[in-house]
Image (cartoon, grey):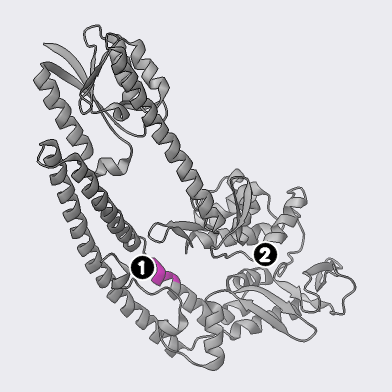
Amino acid sequence: MKTAVIYARVSSREQEQEGYSIQAQLRLLREYASKKGYATPTEFVDIESAKNPGRKSFGEMVSSLRRSKNCRVVIVEKTDRLYRNLKDAVTLEELDLEIHLVKENEVISKDSKSHAKFVHGLRLLMAKNYSDNLKEEVKKGMTEKASQGIYPGRAPFGYRNNRALRNLEVHPENSEIVKLIFETYATGKYSLSDLGKFIKARTGKYINRSYLHTMLRNKFYVGSFQWGGNTYSGKHDTFISRNLFETVQDVFDGHNKPRYQKHDIAFRGLLTCAHDGCTITAELKKQKYVYYRCSGYRGKCELPRFREEEVSSKLGELLKNIHIPDAILERIQESLRSDQVRMRNVSAQQRQKLEQRLSDVRRRMDQAYTDKLDGRITEDFWERRSADWRAEEQQIQFAISGLQEQSESTNLLTIERILELANKAYFLYVTQKPAEQAQLLRKVILNCSIDGASLTPTYRKPFDVIFKRAKTEEWSGREDLNLRPPGPEPGALPG
């Protein structure tokens, strides 16, 4: 009995996980080999694109054929399953093989007629053109997405890709690490290497020096990004202030050298001048006293100097404005926990229904594909119906991904910490040293404008909402505080 090898391929891991494409190919190829009297002791399967050379199993098959003098036959479903690039085609041609293209009802070898070789060459060029055109269309689509202000690539650290909405959203935990990185480096006391060690000790996250440099220079965090050599204004939410970002760039422009000081300037970067918008800088007098004043970048300013103790006291008063009474805090937390239980139940029910629908769609696809192989339905009918099924399958998968990416427990934990911080902020503040006070303030306040008599803060979200509620004493549950997004509405999922 003559010997042959079988080769099957799908383009992606998703297709492999669907479970029918590879198995259907192998079943078809085994039946063909049996009818033609070929023994097929070896089968090669690839789960990757054929647009470029370098597939793992394809390479193993080539090596096996080079070693074997008896096996000169390759059985494959059709041309584009075997290759979509000219280099792989030439590699197999040099091995002097018979290539059996089952679905194209063709056998290609050195003895094939010129017309058969010509048609096969056209199919190869069409397969290559399909890959090239797909690449162009993907690139065009990504450029169009960028022009609309939506970043088309993988989310930078601090963000995550929302597959359901096809956009980027702020990562609740990693964004806090990014804030810490920017705020720590802005002090001017850390080199990038020392910053990496500090972040590892504080958060457990290891970020190498190179990526820290990229992160701290990346304008994405203040609302713009580069794509294809062009700069675009992004629609994504930002959590790094422009003032903080520019302070970090100033540190870099100082040749990335840490400015070690004998005395910490605790509130550096938190204050701006109410008169001219300049940054409030600080200076050390007599190696003991710290004074804050307007930098005077736009000319002489009438803002007086402030002792650090005075600034500390004024900033501490701001934390009183976000205090949540104990009774209100307990009521809000109870409301959040009740909502979490309700949303978990709703999400579980929706997921169960979606998975059942997905299973039904895939079962129909499997059955129809079998019917096509057996000749019970036409190729045109299969192509038309399978396109509809795949669209429905993708829609359901997006909906399931949306449910999976909701982390209710993490959101609840974050919200409760925010509420507890608001409740205890002032008490914590008055018990700390200025450097620790500044770290606490940066969790609550983006920046603060100061004039000769008062401070005007810009609170971070959601402390801005808490401030408004505390000021008017209008307390209610989660809905008024708007600390996290509502759960998915049933109507928002595929019907």
Dot 1 and dot 2 residues touching (CB under 8 Å): no
Q: Which mark is residue 409?
A: 1
In this view, the mark in front (1 or 2) = 2
**What residue is at 32 percent from the left and 17 percent from the top?**
117
Three-letter code for the amino acid on which mark 1 is drawn: Ser
The quadrant holding residue 377 is: top left
Residue 187, visible in the rendered structure: no
Q: Which residue is mark 2?
A: 242
Tell which circle, 1 or 2, labels the residue nearer the N-terminal end: 2
Q: Is residue 407 above or below residue 10?
A: below
Q: Is residue 387 left or right of residue 85?
A: left
- Few, some or many residues within 10 Å of mark 2 (<14, 14–19, 20+): some
Three-letter code for the amino acid on which mark 2 is drawn: Arg
- Residue 392 position, x and y percent, is 26, 56
- Asked whether 310 or 17 is in front, the reply is 17
- Residue 293 position, x and y percent, is 82, 73
- Residue 230 position, x and y percent, is 63, 49
- Residue 193 position, x and y percent, is 63, 46
Q: Is residue 256 above or below residue 41?
A: below
- Asked whether 198 or 39 is in front, the reply is 39
- Few, some or many residues within 10 Å of mark 1 (<14, 14–19, 20+): few
Extreme residue toward the top, this view: 69
Q: Is residue 394 left or right of residue 440?
A: left
The region drawn magenta spans 407-414
- Cα separation, mark 1 vs mark 2, equals 32 Å
- Magenta segment includes 416: no
